[in-house]
Image: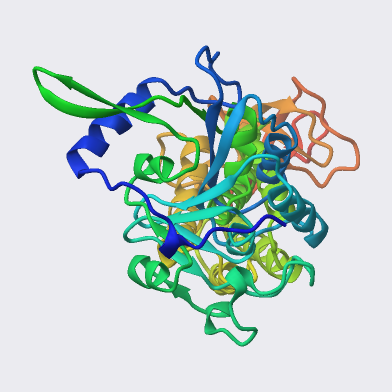
Amino acid sequence: MRARPHACHRVRRRLPAAVLALALGAVLLGATGGVASAKVDHGPVVDVVEVHGFLDPVLVDMLVETLEGLDPAETVAVVLQVDSTTAVVDDAELVRLAALVADAPVPVSFWVGPSGAKATGPIARLAALGDDVGIAPGAHLGEFGDPVLGDRYGTPFGLPADTDLVHRTVGYDEAVELGLARPSPVLLEHLVGLPGFEVRTVTDDDGTTVQPVTPTRFRQLDVVDQFFHTVASPAVAYLLLLVGMGLLVFELYTAGVGIAGMIGAGSFLLATYGLGVLPARGWAVGVLVFAFLGFAIDVQAGVPRLWSVIGSIALVVGSVYLFEGGSFSWITLLVGVVGTIAGVVGGMPAMVRTRFSTPTIGREWMVGEVGTVEERVGPNGTVRVRDAVWRATTNRATPVEPGGDIRVVAVDGLWLEVEPIEGAARDYRR
């Protein structure tokens, strides 16, 4: 493994903030987004790779592809711009990534920034293997956690084995003081501190500015990979699961398959992908499914009852314990629980009634009404009564085919009990 220069012993030139801002603008003007990079005509470049969110299979694959494809003739250094707190891939994948960082043919640098960024868990251990680490004010580094990279690399940053940074993080000032990272308030200042990164001073009528000479190339996930990386974030996977199951319950009590059903099925499938990648508890997912089954019972009844209470309790329990370690904020939890209860318990029965009802108030008037069959009733189907479509059932052994005439004999919640007019019992009371 290459020797990593100590941050406190690096001699570098500090640039005024205004000059850095101007130079950063020049860097950004020459940068391109996406995995595909701009064509460079001015020699080797510095690659800046965004590492944001959990280290999931999609993000790890991009990092592996980038590090495996390094060519010293084309690349001066690689900078990983880090804001990541945990990994959801196997330890073997992390060990593979660690080897690529440690044995890279060009310097690999980590920048924990901008302000508010965090580098904890496996990504913090990977940063310790790089040639250089920078940190922005307001960012945090540490909380290394379990030694998932094996015994080859030892304790991160050469710290004692009993360091408390295994369980806590340090901020900007402490990280610089301990020599874990050098001060890098902005990305350009971090780039200037890299060996081989060249700048030039330009003097004109507006004054003196510093401009980068070494081109910078930005790499990030493409659109499809970014989509699945986002789906595999805890908050998004959780909300997709609630939206998907809620829409499927709504579609269960409507005629045919509509947009709500298709969106619900799509959301549910995406949620299952996210939950499969993340450290989700299987029993908690089962509790959430049970919660929506409880809600579905009272949606059919048309009014909140005992099952709504049971479903609400199950929803809270399943949401709180869904992920190991509590991976989303209380705001996400509040939005998910309150939004689901308000929509499923408060709004859904009314929406279902509105979709199937007619302007006439009450449903007792429907007993004795006649209509036609829309979808085969055998024993369940749909019928049309006074230009409104209803879910219907019959206790007759012979199904009623589409187009057949029926009479309503009873109303049970949002369901009509019907019988065929032809062959039905005659009511002599009329």
- Front in this rendered view, residue 71 or 115: 71
- Front in this rendered view, residue 29 or 354: 29
| Quarter-of-image position of residue 324 | bottom right
Q: Residue furthest left?
A: 205
| Quarter-of-image position of residue 211 | top left
Vertical relation: 242 (above or below) 70: below
Identity of the residue drawn at 64% across and 34% down: 225
Identity of the residue drawn at 63% across and 74% down: 145
Q: Residue furthest bottom?
A: 162
Identity of the residue drawn at 43% across and 56% down: 10
Residue 227 x %, y %: 59, 35
- Front in this rendered view, residue 125 or 221: 125
Residue 141 x %, y %: 48, 66
Identity of the residue drawn at 73% across and 41% down: 64
Task: Determine whether, in the image, residue 330 is placed left or right of residue 61.
Answer: left
Q: Can residue 429 be seen by looking at this rendering?
A: no
Q: Can residue 377 be seen by looking at this rendering?
A: yes
Here the colouring is: rainbow
